[in-house]
């Protein structure tokens, strides 16, 4: 291809991209989706899911708020739905992270169909005994749907960090907030079922089933194709490593080769000199893993360098978090508070931040500590989380000599 022909091709490609971005801008300006679809019918038929994801990423980089992309992402899918419906799902083999996510989506579709039928039967139940039976059928289905959290956690902790490393932070910023909405609505549905609140069950149930079905569509038509175009074989291996720690929803994926835990794979080195005494790297690792608290360390550049892989972590972590900006490890709704804490630590205004929450019947104590060197310079942040339910229940005393009694 001559330079002139290549230049013309590049100009046409750039003009096409700008037209597509203008379509999205018009949507956010209030334009009618059906009118836009009719106006750009020929162009819209050729758009791929990966291209839509890349367009959204560029618009975010150009200043379009993430909240706007999140607010209208369903409208984007609607405008481009003809092209997306015709696009085949990405082909990957057993053991590939996208193949595993796809298997979970097939299982989820079955659970959503069952839940939809159960909701309809509950709505149409005309007497107390029929409604009681309907509630009994809904309870296990809701618990089954709550397993979707594992599916979302693997996206958040394994897939999104690799996309972010390639400059594609849009999916994590947009999808994570939708994940949190779905999680909250599922918990609302569980409470409504426990209370037997018919109106709330029907209202929240219809909403969350639609949200979960829409997320499947967004994943398979936009996120997965975009990820395949963006990530290389090394990235996919890093996504795969650590998936087992977070677990799988409803399935036992095929083709999963065992991999050593990062701590088990580390070889013991010589003794490390500490401020008091010395320990080998293996001893340090064992000590941190056996502490009755969960620890995460973020350096002065807000990069996650370490987490303690304790047997029963309170908040899930996986190797995909290492090297990731800490801001991307928190739900969008808490990002502002995280940044304020780090800024106060960095400025020397605060040295500690403390919180406590109740979660699943447990009382969780969470603390952040500013790490400073001998000259007072900020060198990072230590997060310490502890289940203090049992500690809060202690009373009286138990002395050392009472241990064997």
Image (spheres, rainbow, N blue to C red):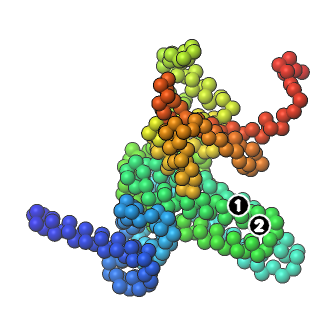
Task: In this rendered view, identify the residue nearer to me: 134 or 357.
Answer: 357
Task: In this rendered view, identify the residue nearer to me: 11 or 125.
Answer: 11
Q: Is residue 95 visible?
A: no
**Residue 152 at what x, y percent from top left?**
57, 55
Q: Is residue 301 visible?
A: yes
Vertical position of residue 95 compared to residue 300: above or below:
below
Q: Earlier in the sequence, mark 2 or mark 1?
A: 1
Q: Tell me the number on the disc at residue 76.
A: none
Farthest residue in the top direction?
Answer: 277
To which quarter of the image does residue 289 belong? top right
Left or right of residue 389: residue 309: left
To which quarter of the image does residue 362 belong? top right
Q: Secondary structure at mark 1?
A: helix
Position of the C terminus, as image quadrant, is top right
Q: Secondary structure at mark 2?
A: helix
Left or right of residue 306: residue 16: left
User: Which residue occupies 66% across, 34% down?
Assistant: 293
Position of the N terminus, as image quadrant, is bottom left
**Residue 395 at what x, y percent from top left?**
87, 33
**Residue 383 at what x, y percent from top left?**
59, 38
Q: Tell me the number on the disc at residue 187.
A: 1
How many neighbours does mark 2 have within 10 angstroms: few (below 14), some (14-19), or many (20 or more)?
Answer: some
**Residue 77 at what x, y percent from top left?**
46, 73
Count how many numbered circles sit on residues in the image: 2
Farthest residue in the front direction?
Answer: 349
User: Circle 2 is placed at which residue position?
Assistant: 192
Left or right of residue 249: residue 364: right
User: Which residue occupies 57% across, 50% down?
Assistant: 337
Vertical position of residue 373 compared to residue 387: above or below:
above
User: Which residue occupies 53% across, 18% down?
Assistant: 274
Mark 2 and mark 1: Cα distance apart in space: 9 Å
User: Which residue occupies 42% across, 77% down?
Assistant: 29
């Amino acid at each position: 291809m001559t330079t002139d022909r290549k230049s013309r091709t590049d100009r046409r490609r750039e003009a096409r991209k700008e037209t597509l971005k203008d379509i999205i801008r018009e949507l956010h300006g209030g334009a009618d989706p059906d009118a836009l679809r009719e106006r750009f019918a020929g162009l819209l038929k050729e758009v791929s899911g990966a291209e839509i994801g890349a367009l959204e990423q560029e618009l975010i980089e150009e200043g379009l708020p993430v909240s706007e992309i999140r607010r209208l992402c369903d409208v984007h899918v609607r405008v481009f739905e003809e092209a997306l419906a015709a696009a085949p799902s990405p082909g990957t083999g057993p053991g590939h992270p996208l193949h595993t996510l796809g298997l979970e989506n097939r299982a989820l579709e079955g659970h959503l169909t069952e839940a939809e039928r159960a909701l309809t039967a509950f709505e149409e139940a005309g007497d107390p005994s029929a409604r009681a039976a309907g509630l009994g059928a809904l309870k296990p289905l809701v618990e089954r749907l709550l397993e979707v959290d594992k599916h979302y956690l693997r996206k958040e902790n394994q897939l999104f960090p690799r996309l972010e490393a390639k400059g594609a932070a849009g999916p994590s910023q947009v999808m994570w907030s939708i994940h949190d909405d779905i999680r909250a609505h599922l918990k609302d549905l569980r409470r409504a079922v426990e209370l037997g609140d018919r109106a709330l069950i029907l209202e929240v149930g219809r909403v969350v089933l639609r949200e979960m079905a829409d997320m499947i569509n967004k994943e398979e038509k936009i996120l997965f194709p975009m990820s395949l175009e963006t990530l290389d074989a090394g990235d996919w291996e890093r996504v795969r490593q650590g998936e087992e720690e977070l677990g799988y929803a409803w399935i036992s994926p095929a083709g999963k080769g065992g991999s050593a835990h990062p701590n088990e794979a580390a070889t013991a080195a010589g003794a490390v000199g500490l401020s008091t005494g010395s320990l080998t790297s293996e001893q340090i690792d064992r000590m941190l893993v056996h502490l009755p608290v969960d620890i995460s360390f973020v350096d002065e550049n807000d990069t996650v360098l370490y987490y303690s892989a304790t047997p029963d972590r309170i908040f899930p972590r996986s190797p995909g978090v290492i090297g990731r900006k800490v801001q991307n490890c928190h739900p969008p709704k808490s990002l502002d508070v995280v940044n304020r804490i780090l800024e106060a630590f960095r400025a020397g205004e605060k040295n500690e931040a403390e919180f406590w929450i109740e979660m699943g019947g447990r009382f969780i104590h969470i603390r952040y500590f500013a790490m400073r060197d001998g000259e007072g310079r900020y060198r990072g942040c230590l997060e310490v989380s502890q289940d203090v339910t049992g500690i809060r229940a202690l009373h009286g005393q138990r002395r050392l000599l009472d241990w064997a009694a």
